[in-house]
Amino acid sequence: MSDINQDQGAEQELQWQEAEPQLPAPTQQSLGQDLMEQDPSTLLQLAEKADLLVSAVKKIKSCVLAVTTTGDWIDEGGKPYLMASGAEKIRPLFGMDWNINDEPEVEVDEAGHRTYKFHGVFTVAGKSISAIGSRSSRDPFFSRSHGNDVDPKKINMANVEKAAYTNCIGNGITRALGIRNITWQELGYAGINRQDEALGKVERASGPIAPPFGDYAKQPLSQVSDDWLRIYLRITTENINDPKKIKFKALNEKLVSALNNEIDRRIVEADIAAALDEKAPPF
């Protein structure tokens, strides 16, 4: 921008500021006088409604904590983050419904990486809110393997798309219920305690384990490499659709859910790590 344009912009902004009427800031005394001018019955109704809202939020949080477990939460930048597995547990409690667009918005960059974005409308008790969920194949979970970059052509974009979809669900449910600001103290009351190593180690030895084959047979999913997580997910998904393995379908569906949760957790981890790296001062 030229100096002339900058001067003109500054002069115009000054004119707007001068033309804008300056209103006196409300004082505590003036606010009190405004309240006293209200009808007492109206004030009482407002107070009672506020009490009901506070009570409702507390009960909603209590229900959420009752049905979720440690594996449904992770530490995202110091704050609790509800995973898609927890969101699915919450849905039937409140008769929640949602409508997410079938086809996501897709952005492709020059390198061939794709970003998927889903828009959803979440409804509970007749009230609706909008939410967005997105994931990119540039997330290190998808774009890095054994310390090396992965060619976008070799990335399973269906997994990236699914991660964006589950992210939309998690965001929508927590927003619709007003529980995005839930605290570690509140989670602690339900036995979900934040530990120093929680970030990146949410799953415990007693949690979901890998199938009885491969390099990580019967080991906790939290200890399985990224590559083997993808292998287990592909094979288990194929087994669900195999008529010869119909009797194992329920078990395989649970394992697919657990694998997707672990993948989602690692993507969030990578996002946090990348954000921290960007904020780190250069040396």
Image (cartoon, rainbow, N blue to C red):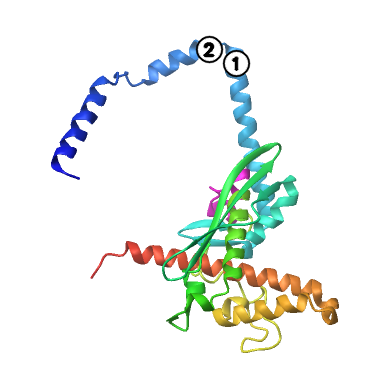
Q: Secondary structure at mark 1?
A: helix
Question: Residue 267, how many percent across, how many down?
Answer: 52, 67
Q: Is residue 156 magenta?
A: no
Q: Look at the image and give the residue range highlighted in magenta.
A: 174-188
- The image quadrant where one finds the N terminus is top left
Q: Is residue 178 visible?
A: no
Nearer-the-camera pick, 187 or 121: 121
Q: Secondary structure at mark 2?
A: loop
Q: Residue 38 shows which numbered tag? A: 2
Q: Amino acid at mark 2?
A: Gln
Q: Is residue 42 visible?
A: yes
Q: Residue 42 shows which numbered tag? A: 1
Nearer-the-camera pick, 112 or 25: 112
Mark 1 vs 2: CB contact within 8 A: yes
Q: Residues within 10 Å of mark 1 (few under 14, many from 20)?
A: few
Q: Residues within 10 Å of mark 2 (few under 14, many from 20)?
A: few
Nearer-the-camera pick, 203 or 92: 92
Please indicate whether residue 208 sits to the left or right of residue 275 in the image.
right
Q: Amino acid at mark 1?
A: Thr
Q: CA distance from mark 1 to mark 2?
A: 7 Å
Q: Residue at x 62, y 67 (%)?
A: 261
Nearer-the-camera pick, 110 or 221: 110
Please indicate whether residue 100 sits to the left or right of residue 150 in the image.
right
Q: Residue at x 62, y 33 (%)?
A: 53
Q: Residue at x 63, y 60 (%)?
A: 84
